[in-house]
Image (cartoon, rainbow, N blue to C red):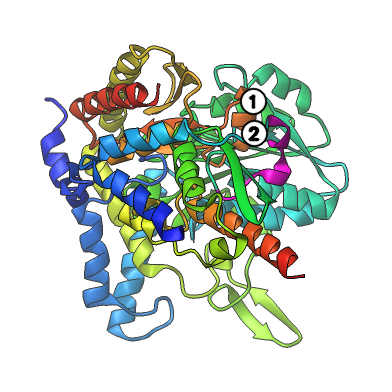
Amino acid sequence: MIIEAQQEIIEEFALFDDWMDKYEHLIGLGKTLPLIDPQFKTDQYIIKGCQSKVWLRAEQQDGRVYFWADSDAIITKGIVSVLIRAFSGLSAQDIVNAPTDFIKEIGLNDHLSPTRANGLVSMIKQMKLYATAFAAQNNA
Amino acid sequence: MGFAIDKIRADFPILLRQVHNKPLIYFDNAATSQKPQQVIDALVHYYTYQNANIHRGVHALSQEATDAYERARDLVKTFFNARLREEIIFTAGTTHSINLVAHGFRSWLQPKDEIIVGQAEHHSNIVPWQMACALTGAVLKVLPIDENGQLQLETLKSLLGPQTKLVVVNHVSNALGTINPIETIIEMAHGHGVQVLVDGAQASSHISVDVQALDVDYYITSAHKMCGPTGVGMLYGKKELLEALPPYQGGGEMIKEVYFEGTTYAGLPHKFEAGTPNIAGGIGFGAAIEYLNTIGLEEIAAYEHELLMHATQGLKQIEGLKIYGDITHKTAVVSFNIGQLHPYDVGTLLDRMGIAVRTGQHCTQPVMDFYGIPGTVRASFAFYNTKEEIDIMIKGVQRAVNMLQ
């Protein structure tokens, strides 16, 4: 399940050779992002470390974790949308254990460096933190 | 005779490289300038043939290194037309220079004293003063900018008073490129017996500065903004002020005599140069100044102004594009946004096209708050850039807009 969702994203991005097409696809994915309810666009849900603002929220329903997000930058929206597609709907423990190398494979690896202003690393960290908290709740 | 752009470009090896398989177009010069071969060679030469610690050794190598380093000080002195060589303090850069003055200035501040700071300052010319205020009970007063990013001088008149101890302001705004009327500001402040510190980081390689004619009390810059190496900069200060200012860091080199009962400090400039300095950096700084001198600041300024006008005109053709600080009296910096597009999106796509611009708040959060924006795209040009590169950027911006809208 983890690998399936990731494999699908990898194959999708593999269709594009040109960086422009890749970014256009990413921008398109941003439009499919499950949007966070505006009432949660507060400092509590903001992810630090991004040049653009990113809000992220998670909930656990019937043993699965779902994410909602938004950003004021379009490319960032695309990036967080890719991450949500990869992780949303998995169990908390699966998200905690999930590998993240698929990001390299889709050619977003320039965004991986911890100093990049888009905060991809911070986003993944935040999603894993949510999952860790849910997993701890489940085991309690 | 025209500007010898091809010859100049050949001096900068980095301009030959590619980024994302496209020729690099470097428009982030306000962040740091590129280095000509002459500067790179000076660093290599120093480490290859002259490396030694300075000011102390009796041996030949140490003497040579000392001479080279002190020669750089003379070059800096002449470049800024300081009266005395000991008025030039080598530091690690602009931030270090400001902290050096702010640290010493604490001992001159009383509760309720005021420091006037420009609204468009870089964070490095705000925070050291906030720290000084927090420790002394002094108060920071903000000299506001208008919609065009220009300092409101009428307000300065009302802010200056017997409680004012210092005015700190940049010569050129890093976020917008605005050239501030520092001559007038200095005159107004001196009329009240108030000292003025000018952050010249964004001006030094674009505007010719004469610290004596300006009668400025402290003038500060970084070598890396002027084709020199990173990690070295300077503080110019009037001799009588620097003599009175308490030292910043203690250590070797800055002392005259050390006893456990007490220490006496060395004279200027060594009093402020504790420890082994950035010798290679200082020598590289000198080489950068020699390089700029061969081209001439007047010629550089005129050429860069042409680039600015060309870019401004071209960018304005893009629908919804707004330039912040849209005036002509500025250095070759265009800070802009297009409609509601986030600067990060535009900058990311330009990067993929091989074009390096800066996006974000440019370490000037108060300026972005003033305009109510998350940041800007900032293209900053240098004398080794061309109109052709600008045309490619303008097309690139249009392409990015098409992708994002």
Q: Quadrant of residue B51?
A: bottom left
Q: In the figure, is residue B188 to the left or right of B269? A: right
In the image shown, does A8 or B48 lie closer to the viewer? A8
Q: Quadrant of residue B405?
A: top left
Eyeballing the image, is B359 above or below B20? above
Eyeballing the image, is B325 above or below A126? above
Residue reaching furthest to the right: B111
Q: Is residue B8 magenta?
A: no
What chain does badge 2 belong to?
B
What chain does badge 1 belong to?
B
Q: In the figure, is residue B108 to the left or right of B230? A: right
Q: Residues within 10 Å of mark 1 (few under 14, many from 20)?
A: some
In the image shown, does B49 or B243 lie closer to the viewer? B49
Residue type highlighted by circle 1: Phe
Mark 2 secondary-structure assignment: helix
Same chain for labels 1 and 2? Say yes or no: yes
Contact, mark 1 vs mark 2 (Cβ under 8 Å): yes
* Residue located beneath label 1 in the image: B370
> Tag on residue B366?
2
Q: Residues within 10 Å of mark 2 (few under 14, many from 20)?
A: some
Residue B402: percent from left, percent from top: 33, 21
Residue type highlighted by circle 2: Pro
Task: Please state the extent of the stretch shown in magenta in the rendering.
Answer: A38-49
Eyeballing the image, is B180 above or below B85? above
Q: In the figure, is residue B3 to the left or right of B182? A: left
Q: Kindly tell me whether residue A100 is visible in this rendering.
A: yes
Which residue lies at the image location 73% right of the left edge and 45% below the top edge? A44
